[in-house]
């Protein structure tokens, strides 16, 4: 097994066991020996999925989910990782109003999407977590973004997402924005139920879709 493959395996196991210091040490080593920051995020995510399973089968409790969240945030804060989220080019491609929908406090995926979008020269107006539909509508009216991004990790937030799209329609704003939704559970079917223009289970895929939208709208003029 290659050194990187071994590191990945150890990282997944350390996240699963919630071994904070070990995760940070292994992450720093992995970045030093050449693991791409995006690959590191995917590796940590693999461990998070295992934490989720242990929570589901009642081996872990809410405190363990909190710990897992803190560990992930510490990895995102490592110097090499913050560079991933740093945009040199100041000319902005477009603007995104982004939030985690009402009822959901998970913000790690949202923050990753924000970081990657900013690196790709979007201006992101992050309106936080547990955001009611009225707040989305207000921000869209004020800021006139090209794109609205919604994050929702809990499966029942599908309805909260639909309510935001419906509220945008009622406010006469739906035609002025593209809507992208993100969360591991989303599918084509939920996307069309919600009435979004696109969905992504992965933040980077979502950013690629947004780039495509901006490029094709610029091509139209
Ligand atoms: C950490 C964690 C928490 C932390 C969150 C800390 C934080 N600051 O975010 C805390 C402790 C707060 C928490 C609370 C709860 N949690 Co929780 N949590 C997790 C855990 C372990 C990891 C989530 C995570 O950050 N993953 C890593 C990130 C990177 O992944 P992600 O968020 O999915 O983001 C990716 C994509 O979805 C996408 N994406 C995300 N947003 C966006 C937005 C856009 C626009 C785009 C394009 C893409 C995109 O990109 C990211 C990858 O590139 C998961 C387990 C799992 N399977 O994921 C459970 C999990 C999500 N939690 C769960 C549950 C049940 C809860 C609680 C209800 C528990 C309780 N009884 O209180 C509460 C709910 C609180 C609330 N109202 O939100 C369940 C959800 C089950 C379900 N079917 O809905 C899970 C799946 C665990 C499980 N298997 O049971 N949790």
Image: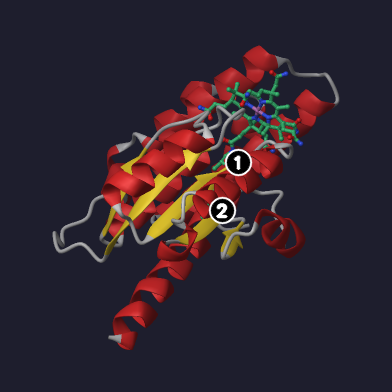
> In the image, is residue 51 above or below residue 209?
above
**Whereabouts is ligand 1, in terms of quadrant?**
top right
Q: Can you see residue 147?
A: yes
Q: Residue at x 33, y 36 (%)?
A: 78
Tell me which corner region of the image, top left, top right, bottom left or bottom right, holds residue 24.
top left
Tell me which corner region of the image, top left, top right, bottom left or bottom right, holds residue 188.
bottom right
- Residue for badge 1: 152
Compute the Cα span from label 2 to label 1: 8 Å
Q: Do callouts 2 and 1 mark residues in contact (Cβ within 8 Å)?
A: yes
Q: Which numbered disc flags the more N-terminal residue, 2 or 1?
A: 1
Q: Residue at x 62, y 43 (%)?
A: 163
Instruction: Tell me residue 81's x, y (percent).
Output: 34, 44
Answer yes or no: disc 1 within 8 Å of ligand 1. yes
Q: Is mark 2 on a helix, strand or loop?
A: strand
Answer yes or no: disc 2 within 8 Å of ligand 1. yes
Q: Is mark 1 on a helix, strand or loop?
A: loop
Q: Can you see residue 111?
A: no
Instruction: Tell me residue 36's x, y (percent).
Output: 41, 57
Horizontal relation, residue 1 to residue 149: left or right: right
User: Which quarter of the rendered picture does the C terminus lie within?
Assistant: bottom left
> In the image, is residue 203 above or below residue 176?
above
Horizontal relation, residue 81 to residue 157: left or right: left
- Residue for badge 2: 181
């Amino acid at each position: 097994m290659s050194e990187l493959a071994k590191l990945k395996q150890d990282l997944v196991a350390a996240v699963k066991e919630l071994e904070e210091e070990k995760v940070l040490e292994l992450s720093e080593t992995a970045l030093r020996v050449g693991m791409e920051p995006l690959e590191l995020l995917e590796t940590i995510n693999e461990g998070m999925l295992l934490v989720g399973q242990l929570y589901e089968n009642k081996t872990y409790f809410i405190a363990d989910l909190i710990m897992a969240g803190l560990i992930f945030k510490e990895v995102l804060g490592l110097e090499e990782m913050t560079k991933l989220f740093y945009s040199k080019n100041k000319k902005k491609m477009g603007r995104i109003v982004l939030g985690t929908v009402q009822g959901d406090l998970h913000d790690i995926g949202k923050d990753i999407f924000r970081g990657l979008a900013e690196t790709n020269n979007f201006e992101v107006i992050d309106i936080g977590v547990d955001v009611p539909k009225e707040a989305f509508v207000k921000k869209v009216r004020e800021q006139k973004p090209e794109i609205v991004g919604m994050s929702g990790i809990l499966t029942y937030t599908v309805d909260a997402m639909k309510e935001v799209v419906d509220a945008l329609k009622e406010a006469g704003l739906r035609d002025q924005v593209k809507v992208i939704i993100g969360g591991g559970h989303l599918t084509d079917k939920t996307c069309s139920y919600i009435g979004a223009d696109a969905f992504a289970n992965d933040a980077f895929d979502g950013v690629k879709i947004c780039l495509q939208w901006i490029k094709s709208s610029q091509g139209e003029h």
